[in-house]
Structure formats: C-alpha cells, structure tokens
DNA sequence: TGTACATCAGTGAACGCGCGTTCACTGATGTAC
DNA sequence: TGTACATCAGTGAACGCGCGTTCACTGATGTAC
C-alpha cells in the first residue's frame, strides 16, 4: 500500500521537477536578467517541450512570483544563519547581506532593483521583509544608542507602524533604517558596476560605511 | 541659394524627427521600463512604418545608447543649473538629484539601476560621470572638513585617480563619495517603491541623510 | 494476484503576436547647370 | 528660368525568430477491487 500525503512518489517527482525548472530559471536570470526569462528556453534546456512546464507553473508570471519569493527567502535565511552563528550583530548581518547580493547580482536586483515592468510582487514577501527588518533591529538593539535627540526621531516615533511593533527606541529604528539604505547604496552601485571604472575598492567602502554605522 | 552647413532645412527636419522619436521612446520607458522599448511601437505611435526609423537610428541599440547619453546629460544639466543658482552647495545638488530621479524613475534606473541585459553603456558617459563627480567635490570643498584621521582616507589617497585629479583632500573625497552612495541608497529604494508599504516619508529620510552628510 | 480504471506527465501542432531588420521601390525635395 | 539629375524620407512586403499559451492526444504510472 503506497503511502498517502506529502510523501507520494508522484508528489516528490513533481517537487523535484519544479525545483529543476527554477534552477534553470535562475541560471537564465543570472546571465541575462529577469526580463529575459523565457519558459520555452527553460523547457529546451531541460529537453522538454514548452507546454510541459504548464504542468508545474500556471505561466510565466507564476514562475517569476515563485522566484521572487525564493529570493526573499534565501536572503532571510542567509541573515538568519548569520544571526545564529554570531548572535544578533549588525556587522555579521552586513557581511551576510553583501555576500548574498554579490553571489548573484541579478537575484539581488530582482528583489531590490528596477521593478520588473508590469509585474507586482506577491503579498507574502512583505512578511519576509518584516522578518528581515526585525533581525536588523534586534541586532541594532545590542549597540549603545546616542542620547542626543535626533530631528528625524520624531517622525520615526509617530510612524512606527513600519517597525511592526518592534520595541526598539527611535534611535535604534533610525540606525536600522540607515543600515538598510546606506548598505544598499553601496551595494546597488557596486552590483550595477558603477565602481569598476573608478579604481577604488567597493569592499573597503562598504566596510567604511559599516564602521560608521556601528560607531554613530 | 540655400544655406550650407548645419542649418540646412533637411538637417533641421532630421534633427526634429530624431528628437520626436526619442521623446516617444522616453514615454515608453517611463511607463514600461527600458527593456520594453520597441522600435515598431514607436513608429506606430508616430504614424510611421517600422523601417522608417532606420533613417534616424542604426537600430534599437543605437537608440538606447543615445537615450542613455541624454539621461546622463540631463542629470548633469540639472546639477549644473542648481550650482549656477545656488553656487557650489551640496544641499542644492542633493535636491536637484532627487527631483531629477523622481521626475522619471525609469530614466533614473536606466542610468543607475539594473544594467540592461546585453547592453553596454557608451564610453563618453564616463566623461559626464566625471563632470558630475567634479560638481559634487567642488561643493564638498566648501564645507569644513573634520581634522580627525579616517581609516578609509588612506585608501582614497592611494587611489585618487577616480577623482580625476581633483585637488580635494581625502576627507572631502570621502564626503563626496558618501554623498553619492547614501543618497542613491535612499533614492533607489524609494524609486523602486520599497518604502510605500512602510508608511514613512522618504523625503524626510532623504533630508535626514543629507543633514547628516553636511554635519559629519 | 491480476484486471479495469483513473490520474497525470509530456507531446506536437497550432494560434496569434510582436520583435528587429533587409530590401527594392516610390515620390518628394533639393542641387547644378 | 527651366530642365536634368541626385539625394533622401518613407513605404510595403518579406524573413526569420521567439514568445506565451491552448488544445486534443498518447502513454506511462498509480489505484481499487
């Protein structure tokens, strides 16, 4: 008697092929960007006919949605692993973020870059975004906060809904937000290749920004 | 006797149609992004047949190249106008940059966002990039620089080629670079819509970052 | 255990579309004498 | 001034391509008795 439920051979096969499709999709995105993603091309790479993929995904948009979700998840996982290894620590998170972004710049852009035209991200990615911000704020909590009043703090205090009820004081919220925007400032320009002609080392710039964040 | 040289009626007509093509191209980019740009669609919008555009541009890539160049130029012009109005002033440059970026986010992304797959920017854009950085450094020179030695300064000093011989001391180079990366950090996330769900005001965050840059 | 049936992965043909690009051409505009 | 010629903008047909997606189908795998 064959086992019922999630472990069915057919279901395992399905999951396996789905995974293989996504893997080929990522290779395609890595080399040519998300807008070049083509179902037929993936099918050809796998030795299948085009329509075969419709057994596994409702269409191109459905596949992209799944990839966006996976990208968010893989970043969250990378940050979670960093936290588990070093405890809540902004430097560890920063390095995990940079490594993740540069390992596959187009995956990074799929999440934080130019929005894919005509495509809107699935709702559940905001949950993952929230989890990411929570990890950052947890790490920011471990640093001593400046007592001096910040002009921006008032704004953060009155709109603290974005922190999803995190108990961080305004100065910590501010630091977490700057962690986010400043590191993305360096990373997005680096990943887009805007430092290559300049002859300076983006890694050191990133490190300098991180140090500044930790010391402020 | 018709006038010779650059003012010929035919040449003026040519330039006019070229401009009209580019304008339609920008409208298309503004709504659907650069990867959706189509020569045939532009021709249709103009009431022309597709091949007609080949009188004006060698092909799609040639048109995109021209658009990238124009985008760089329009940013440089915006910053130049700001400098002419306020003198060398980082705050004025920052506001001009933000206004330019948000006026047409996809134009901003064409320059600073995800690289267009398979396309490489023309060489002369680096000249415009240099001019932009020069304006920033000129403005950064007017601020008092901190005397404290920075760890990152040594790296900037030994690779000051990126500043194209600008006489700014390392601390100013550093400030100019941070101006660039931090404001892009906020702007790129804002233009990509990553703050919309959070309920906080990107303009105030931008302003807070600018203040921090001016005060550091 | 074998047999009848249901499920489902994958195929091949087809549809309609839009793309970039070429080519031979027409017809209007400018040029030279 | 008019006439012969050259230039050049724009057309329409065509090529070859790849795309997403649908549909009726075959054949293998699993299920029920």
Image (cartoon, coloured by chain):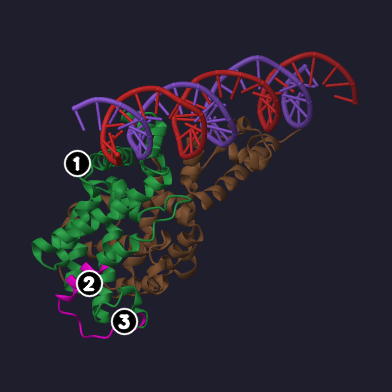
Chain colours: A green, B brown, C purple, D red
Residue A137: mark in rendering: 2
Look at 19% across and 80% down and name the residue there: A145
Q: Is residue A111 left or right of residue B56?
A: left
State the residue in front, A191 or A49. A49
Badge 1: chain ID = A
Q: Badge 2: how crowded within 10 Å, few (<14), some, or many (20+)? A: many
The residue lying at 70 percent from left, 37 percent from top is B9
- Provide residue A63's location: percent of width, then percent of height: 37, 45
Tag 1 near tag 3, CB within 8 Å: no
The residue nearer to you, when weighing D12 against A11, is A11
Q: Give neighbour class at mark 3: few <14, some 14-19, many 20+ (Cα, 10 Å).
A: some
Image position of B141 (left or right of B153):
right
User: Are marks 2 and 3 in one subunit?
Assistant: yes
Q: Is residue A144 magenta?
A: yes
- Disc 2/disc 3 C-alpha distance (Å): 15 Å
Compare marks 1 and 3 and give the one earlier in the sequence: 1
Extent of the magenta region: A133-157
Residue lying at 27% horizontally and 46% vertically, measured from the top left: A196
Residue topped by disc 1:
A1
In magenta stretch: residue B74: no
Residue A66 position in % (x across, y down): 34, 49
**Quadrant, the C terminus of chain A:** bottom left
Placement of the N terminus of chain A among the 4 image quadrants: top left
Quick check: A48 above or below A148? above
Q: Earlier in the sequence, mark 2 or mark 3?
A: 2
């Amino acid at each position: 008697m064959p086992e019922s439920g999630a472990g069915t051979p057919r279901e395992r096969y399905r999951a396996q092929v789905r995974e293989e499709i996504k893997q080929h999709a990522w290779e395609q995105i890595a080399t040519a960007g998300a807008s070049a993603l083509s179902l037929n091309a993936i099918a050809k790479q796998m030795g299948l006919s085009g329509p075969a993929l419709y057994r596994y995904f409702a269409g191109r948009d459905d596949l992209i949605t799944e990839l966006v979700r996976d990208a968010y998840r893989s970043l969250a996982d990378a940050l979670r692993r960093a936290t588990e290894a070093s405890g809540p620590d902004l430097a560890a998170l920063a390095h995990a973020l940079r490594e993740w972004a540069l390992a596959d710049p187009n995956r990074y852009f799929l999440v934080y870059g130019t929005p894919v035209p005509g495509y809107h991200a699935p709702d559940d990615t905001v949950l993952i975004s929230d989890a990411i911000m929570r990890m950052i704020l947890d790490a920011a909590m471990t640093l001593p906060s400046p007592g001096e009043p910040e002009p921006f703090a008032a704004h953060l205090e009155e709109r603290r809904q974005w922190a999803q009820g995190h108990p961080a004081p305004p100065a910590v919220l501010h630091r977490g937000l700057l962690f986010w925007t400043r590191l993305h400032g360096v990373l997005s320009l680096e990943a887009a290749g805007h430092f290559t002609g300049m002859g300076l080392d983006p890694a050191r710039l990133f490190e300098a920004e991180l140090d500044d964040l930790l010391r402020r």
